[in-house]
Amino acid sequence: MYSQGLIGADGATHEDAAFLEAFQARIDAELKIEPNDPMPAGYRKTLVRQIAQHAHSEIVGMLPEGNWITRAPTLRRKAALLAKVQDEGGHGLYLYSAAETLGVSREELVDQLLSGKAKYSSIFNYPAITWADIGTIGWLVDGAAIMNQIPLCRCSFGPYARAMIRVCKEESFHQRQGYEIMLTLSRGSEEQKAMAQDALNRWWWPSLMMFGPHDADSTHSDQSMAWKIKRFTNDELRQKFIDATVPQAEFLGLTMPDPDMKWNEEKGGYDHGEIDWDEFWRVVKGDGICNRDRMKARRKAHDDNAWVREAALAYADKAAARETAVAAE
Ligand code: BYC
């Protein structure tokens, strides 16, 4: 019911070798693919999957932080957190709009989330227990998001790439507000420093999992790289994030919760310990600490706000009837 014209909605293409070659040539020439352009069904499907998962992550990602708005320690912190959580709602909306240009409605995508069919980022199934968690989410979770999303500004699909430009600007503010909270805590009392370290210990490994499985276990990477939807593999981005983040932790005077973390001169990056992939897949499959709570909260919000959707539809019907009446005069 919210779809925006669904341009390109039929999406029917005759995928013979010549068509696929011509499409790949456009990608290789760095031309943007736009909604009305012919595209392979697999390209469309991959984008709908990734953009929708991304949109759902933004919306579910509002929950752990939204919970802290009333408990932020000062008015300044409250205003910044409120603005950040609002931005995330906005990111979800740009992304649902980008997905809609591929011929799928927002309603359908939201139904997939609420029925448990669609995935969202594993990271939002961990609880935000202390104020330091809010600092850590901004620093690490938004830091990881930026690392992953800057290359998406060059994604081959125009509407996704353009949405990412604004999203990345806002993510940069989010990362800084988180790092500033961590800086204040790590320059504070012993108790505050301990709180900052504890939050880092709990969020570090889940943040590394945000980049997805190792390249060898990544189902979609090869094709998404060929189509220039992804510009770097999961492991490449994870490594860039680690290399950027370790010096930031050192500046804070915090210790990385990884005894195997050490600089490797030869590769010009940090070596690190193995990620607990059993934990990752458990969380992705719905069995993390907060999966059930998150879905319960989203379903409740959807049901409680049904009246908004009904009112918007009633208004649209009335406006259309008025227009028809005026046209008939
Ligand atoms: N969590 O073949 P792979 C944010 C799934 S929003 C859950 O490597 P792909 C923020 C994957 O979907 C953060 N599932 O997949 C918001 C696939 O399953 P399906 C979200 C994951 O797509 C608010 C399977 O595992 N960012 O930062 O090539 C506040 C195999 O993976 C995860 C985006 O969505 C995961 N972590 O690469 C603060 C960015 N990882 O679909 C911050 C856009 C993998 O076959 N997305 N899976 O059933 C991407 O860049 C890519 O989709 C990914 C995964 C790198 C995440």
Image: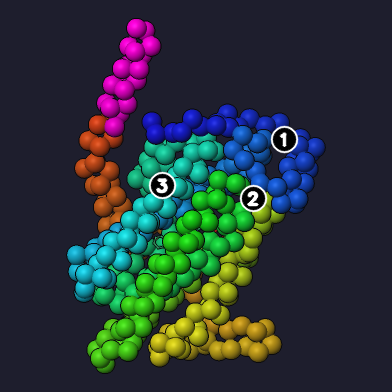
Q: Callout 1, which amino acid?
A: Glu
Q: Which residue is mark 3?
A: 93
Sequence-earlier tag: 1 or 3: 1
**Image position, residue 25 (x, y; %):** 77, 46
Residue 325 lies, with reference to residue 42, above or below; the image says above
Residue 58 lies, with reference to residue 253, above or below; the image says above
- For image coordinates 34% across by 74% down, the residue present is 135
Q: Which residues are magenta?
A: 312-329
> Can you tell me whether the CB of the residue at mark 2 lies under 8 Å from the nearest atom of ligand 1?
no
Is 326 a magenta residue? yes
**Image position, residue 20 (x, y; %):** 75, 41
Sequence-earlier tag: 2 or 1: 1
Give the CA separation, mark 2 to mark 1: 19 Å
Query: Which colour style is shown?
Result: rainbow
Give the CA separation, mark 2 to mark 3: 20 Å
The local crowd at label 3, few if under 14, some if 14 to 19, many if 20 or more residues have their Cα within 10 Å, is some
The chief SS type of the magenta part is helix
Which image quadrant for residue 316?
top left
**Quadrant holding the N terminus:** top left
Sequence-earlier tag: 2 or 3: 3
Q: How many marks?
A: 3
Q: Secondary structure at mark 3?
A: helix
- For image coordinates 40% across by 67% down, the residue present is 174
Q: Callout 3, which amino acid?
A: Leu
Q: Callout 2, which amino acid?
A: Ser
Residue 111 visible in the current orientation: yes
Q: Which residue is mark 2?
A: 156
The residue closer to the viewer here, 258 or 148, is 148
**Image position, residue 160 (x, y; %):** 54, 49
> Can you tell me whether the CB of the residue at mark 1 lies under 8 Å from the nearest atom of ligand 1?
no
